[in-house]
Structures are given as structure tokens and as C-alpha cells.
Image: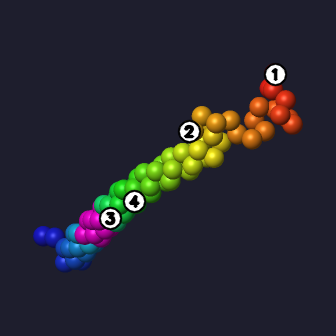
Amino acid sequence: MTDTNQIDLQSLRIQAGYQAGHSMDTLIRSYAQNTAGALAVAEAQKVVAEEQIAELKKKVAKLEATLAEARGEVSGEPMAGKAGKAGKPAR
């Protein structure tokens, strides 16, 4: 027959294995949930950043148009001093 101490030791090993497996399962599930949450946050931040980029591109386009108009490029008139110093033609 099997000694009672051996049965108790086997039972403890089985319980320890089960608890270790349960702990690993809990850790893996937590990690997966944290990773999924982090990915969702990153995706949301990406969308916000893309919207900000689009807005900045619009602002840059407006500024470039304003600058071009200030230089006379839009109206076809040369900018003062663009042709050269003191009214001399550019070479």
C-alpha cells in the first residue's frame, strides 16, 4: 500500500501545480487585457494626431497663400525691393 505521507505529498504537489497554473492564467489574461487596452488608446491617439495634422496642413496652406499674396506672387506685382536695390533691375 501507499504511505499516507506520500499521498499527502502528491496531493500538495497537485494543488501547487493547479495554483501555479491558475496564477499563470491570471497573469496572461491581465497582460492580454492591458495590451488590448493600450492598443485601443494608441489607436485613439493616432486618430487624434491625424486630425491635428489635417488641421495644421490647412493652416499651413492658408499661411502660404497669405505669404504669396504679401509677396505679390498672387497679384502678379513684384515685391518691393525684389527687382534689386534702389530700383536697379535685377541681373
The answer to whether mark 3 and mark 2 are in CB contact below 8 A is no
Indicate which disc, 1 or 2, sits on the residue closer to the N terminus: 2
Q: Secondary structure at mark 1?
A: loop
Part of the protein shown in magenta? 20-33
Q: Residues within 10 Å of mark 3 (few under 14, many from 20)?
A: few
Taking the spot 19% from the left edge, 78% from the top edge, the residue there is 4
Location of mark 2 (residue): 74
Question: Which is nearer the eye, 31 or 6?
Answer: 31
Q: Secondary structure at mark 2?
A: loop
Amino acid type indicated by mark 4: Val
Q: Position of residue 9 (x, y in %)?
A: 26, 73
Q: Position of residue 33 (x, y in %)?
A: 29, 65
The answer to whether mark 1 and mark 2 are in CB contact below 8 A is no
Can the viewer see residue 42 in this picture? no
Amino acid type indicated by mark 3: Gly
Q: How is the image coloured?
A: rainbow
The answer to whether mark 4 and mark 3 are in CB contact below 8 A is no
In this rendering, which labeled residue sits more in front, label 1 or label 4? 1
In this rendering, which labeled residue sits more in front, label 4 or label 3? 4
Amino acid type indicated by mark 1: Arg
Q: Residues within 10 Å of mark 2 (few under 14, many from 20)?
A: few
**Spatial distance from mark 4 to mark 3, Cα to Cα?**
17 Å
Quarter of the figure with the N terminus: bottom left
Q: Is residue 79 left or right of residue 3?
A: right
The answer to whether mark 4 and mark 2 are in CB contact below 8 A is no
The answer to whether mark 1 and mark 3 are in CB contact below 8 A is no
